[in-house]
Amino acid sequence: MSNTFGRLFRFTTWGESHGPALGVVVDGCPAGLPLDESDLQRDLDRRRPGQSRVTTQRKEEDRAEILSGVFEGKTTGHPISILIRNKDADSSKYEPLRNLFRPGHADFTYIQKWGIRDHRGGGRSSARETAARVAAGAIAKKLLARLGVSILGYVDQVGEVRWDGAHFDADEIERNIVRCPDAETASRMEAAILEARKAGDSVGGAITVLADGVPAGWGEPLYGRLDSDLAAAMMSINAVKGVEIGSGFRAAGMRGSENNDPFEMKDGEPGVRTNNAGGILGGISTGAPIVVRFAVKPTSSILIEQDTVTTSGEKTTVKVEGRHDPCVATRAVPIGEAMMALVLADHWRLGLGSRIE
Ligand SMILES: Cc1cc2nc3c(=O)[nH]c(=O)nc-3n(C[C@H](O)[C@H](O)[C@H](O)COP(=O)(O)O)c2cc1C
């Protein structure tokens, strides 16, 4: 089973959507990092359901309790165990779904693999699990901040509405409910989400995550390339269907003369003038910002009737009621940031012994 991610800075999550609690154990955090529950809460609040009219109305407080690995306000170097209780799980809505396969969900594949599944809220396949990774990611972010690395994510596409990149205001991201860096585009995105919800439908989106301050030299080619670990990290988030680094899929339509990033001297050190590589060459950071973009599919649970079959093979239809996000992109922003931080914290540790001088 794969519930653990990372090598030297690693975490293991556990728990189901409608169980009593879920949590995470983070191992490999250096001793001496000041840490308390408020450090985890900011990002948990950004991921939390019930934040706004474009997210699910499930009301979870998502209070993180640190059970181990912190003594007198500092990490001890031992496993940090975090507990998050489930308080607002309403399992009754899932009873009619117990014996059928919801289109777009993991119901079918979980039954194929294990022959048993917790149907309540999707059980382990639910994105409720991402609360635990966000808590782990907050620790990685705090560690990285000490190393001069900062991480920022935002929504750049909702359905057909795409931010054109012209106007970027970092402060705007948390001011609007879709987390887009441009207020005017954000209001068009919000309208697209509300329109999909009104139609009983859902809409997809895309998120960009930037990491600033990563020095040149992080990454473990060949099979621990920074880009391949970031792709695996983002792809492990529920509903993610595509990941790009730098110019990504646009590179397929470009010429080498456009896509190459020319080198130049900056403050006496070689650096890149542009950043189509997304801050990574040969699987190793260049010192330019790391740029990762990922696409989330439209939410699977919709009120529109869809064809399906029961677990015993009879034809039926399903309308998925309950509390669902009409677009998961806005809540995926802190999750993408957490995964970026967790990969970078691991690569910082992995790289510490890479040369003698
Ligand atoms: C933050 C977040 C919230 C999500 N909320 C829902 C939801 O309310 N309803 C739903 O059908 N899917 C939701 N999803 C997506 C499902 O968990 C996911 O599509 C499903 O488990 C199938 O897995 P896959 O899409 O990765 O193949 C959410 C995903 C994320 C990242």
Image (cartoon, rainbow, N blue to C red):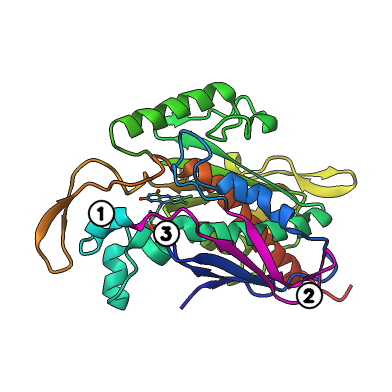
Q: Left or right: 297 with respect to 135?
A: left
Q: Secondary structure at mark 1?
A: loop
Residue at the location (51% across, 73% down)? 3
Q: Left or right: 275 with respect to 148?
A: left
Disc 1 within 8 angstroms of ligand 1 (CB)? no
Count of marks placed on residues: 3
Q: What is the magenta range?
A: 62-91
Q: CA separation, marks 2 and 1?
A: 44 Å
Q: CA separation, marks 3 and 2?
A: 31 Å
| Residue position for label 1 | 103
Q: Left or right: 5 with respect to 150?
A: left
Disc 2 packing (10 Å; few <14; some 14–19; many ≥20): some
* Lower position in the chain sequence, tag 3 or tag 2: 2
Q: Marks 2 and 1: CB-CB under 8 Å?
A: no
Disc 3 within 8 angstroms of ligand 1 (CB)? yes
Q: Secondary structure at mark 2?
A: loop
Disc 3 marks a residue whose amino acid type is Ser
Disc 1 marks a residue whose amino acid type is Pro
* Lower position in the chain sequence, tag 2 or tag 1: 2
Q: Quadrant of the C terminus?
A: bottom right
